[in-house]
């Protein structure tokens, strides 16, 4: 830094009694410095003229070394092991003049379609899943809902990420109104609306299968194909956009996979997801018809009500699999199995996958007709 003499005198943001152990410059951004002290880490955006704490969730501990590697900040500590801050892209952009009074959507870095098993946030060590890291800044708390819309290179809608919380499920059998209120029934939205810097990790997936549970609806869809993607942040009727690339896993490319093959796999997977959603919605319709009939039969048994229940259950179990061990798998389970098989690895779908999709589509149509006949 140009002002090394000022680093330890307590006038530039680092307390005078914080001995500095190590200082490093970001190789991608001249003048962006990181200082490791006896009691934590500090950052300077102006080549050492001024410093501010950059502790985040890092424990207060001596910093023994710092390295910027592949756009991540790696820190070794005394007695607290190694710590990694993923994706310094937004930090690099903050080194340039930024209007603190305006909304900012920072440019994501290139992401890769890696397939690996992530761990939970409470795991040690914690391995987050592969994702596009979306950083954004809000100068003030926003009252209205905000969202990020993801589009592919052709402008097709891929995913909408929102601050709106999924609707709470209603437990009609709860003994009191308060019994309906449970933490798992009141999930937060994906995006934060409070003033300040925020980060969301998009899992690079299309919308998944429909689910009557609002907190799980459209989750876990197929990974998107390699290509350029546009991210549009919508805040108070204003739009802020960035474009970045998602690349094929280099290991898949070495195994002979191409973007065209992956696009074919994704195309068939999306058809299967739509088919599974249709089957799941049909099952929900059947259950909605069955529930009041079963309640009516429990209150007053009659042969007419029992006959209607039997007819609906006959259709239901053309679609769903009965409870129990080694039960025959019906249409919905078979569609779900095809979905899993298609998306376990990067692969070119075989002819049998297309054939099975066509067969299951015909089978689902038969169930639809049987239900409509009732």
Image (spheres, rainbow, N blue to C red):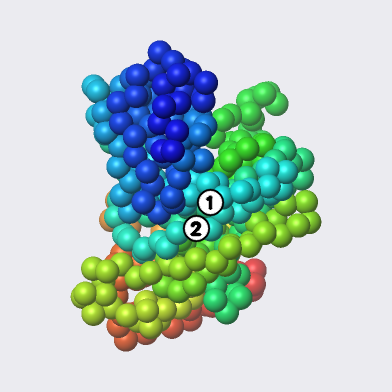
Inter-mark Cα distance, 1 to 2: 11 Å
Question: Residue 195 location, x and y as percent?
Answer: 67, 37
User: Which one is nearer the viewer's eye here, 234 or 47?
Assistant: 47
Residue 139 in view: yes
Tag shown at residue 114: none
Q: Quadrant of residue 166?
A: top right
Q: Is residue 99 found left or right of 328 in the rendered image?
A: right
Question: Residue 114 location, x and y as percent?
Answer: 32, 61
Residue at image point 46% right, 40% down: 47
Residue at image point 63% right, 48% down: 98
Count neighbours of disc 1 (C-alpha within 10 A) and say few if under 14, some if 14 to 19, many if 20 or more: few
Residue farthest along the top direction in this orientation? 17
User: Which one is nearer the viewer's eye here, 295 or 84?
Assistant: 84
Residue at image point 37% right, 79% down: 259
Q: Is residue 101 found left or right of 373 in the rendered image?
A: right
Q: Quadrant of the C terminus?
A: bottom right
Residue, disc 2? 108
Mark count: 2
Residue, disc 1? 93
SS of the residue under disc 2: loop
SS of the residue under disc 1: helix
Residue at image point 32% right, 80% down: 258
Residue farthest along the left direction in this orientation? 255
User: Which one is nearer the viewer's eye here, 62 or 271?
Assistant: 62
- Is 313 drawn above or below residue 96 in the view shown? below
Count neighbours of disc 2 (C-alpha within 10 A) and say few if under 14, some if 14 to 19, many if 20 or more: many
Question: Residue 7 location, x and y as percent?
Answer: 42, 26
Answer whether labels 1 and 2 touch (C-beta < 8 Å): no
Earlier residue among tags 1 and 2: 1
């Amino acid at each position: 830094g140009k002002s090394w003499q000022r680093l330890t005198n307590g006038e530039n943001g680092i307390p005078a009694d914080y001995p500095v152990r190590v200082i490093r410059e970001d190789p991608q951004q001249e003048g962006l410095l990181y200082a490791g002290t006896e009691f934590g880490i500090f950052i300077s955006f102006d080549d050492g003229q001024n410093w501010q704490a950059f502790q985040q969730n890092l424990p207060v501990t001596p910093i023994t070394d710092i390295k910027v590697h592949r756009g991540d900040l790696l820190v070794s500590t005394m007695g607290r092991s190694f710590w990694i801050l993923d994706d310094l892209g937004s930090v690099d952009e903050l080194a340039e003049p930024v209007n603190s009074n305006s909304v900012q959507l920072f440019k994501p870095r290139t992401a890769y379609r890696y397939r690996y098993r992530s761990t939970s946030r409470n795991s040690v060590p914690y391995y987050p899943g592969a994702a596009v890291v979306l950083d954004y800044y809000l100068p003030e708390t926003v009252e209205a809902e905000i969202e990020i819309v993801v589009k592919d290179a052709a402008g097709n809608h891929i995913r909408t990420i929102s601050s709106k919380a999924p609707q709470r499920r209603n437990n009609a059998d709860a003994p009191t109104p308060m019994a309906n209120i449970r933490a798992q029934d009141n999930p937060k939205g994906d995006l934060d609306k409070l003033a300040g810097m925020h980060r969301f990790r998009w899992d690079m997936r299309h919308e998944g299968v429909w689910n009557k549970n609002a907190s799980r609806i459209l989750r876990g869809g197929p990974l998107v194909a390699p290509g350029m993607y546009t991210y549009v942040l919508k805040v108070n009727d204003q739009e802020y956009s960035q474009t970045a690339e998602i690349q094929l896993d280099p290991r898949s490319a070495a195994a002979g996979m191409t973007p065209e093959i992956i696009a074919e796999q994704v195309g068939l997977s999306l058809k299967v997801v739509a088919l599974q959603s249709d089957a799941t919605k049909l099952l929900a319709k059947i259950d909605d018809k069955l529930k009041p009939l079963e309640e009516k039969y429990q209150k007053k048994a009659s042969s007419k009500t029992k006959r209607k229940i039997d007819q609906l259950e006959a259709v239901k179990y053309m679609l769903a699999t009965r409870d129990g061990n080694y039960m025959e798998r019906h249409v919905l389970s078979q569609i779900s199995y095809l979905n899993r098989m298609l998306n376990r690895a990067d692969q070119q779908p075989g002819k049998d996958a297309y054939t099975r999709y066509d067969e299951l589509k015909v089978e689902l149509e038969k169930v639809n007709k049987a239900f409509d006949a009732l």
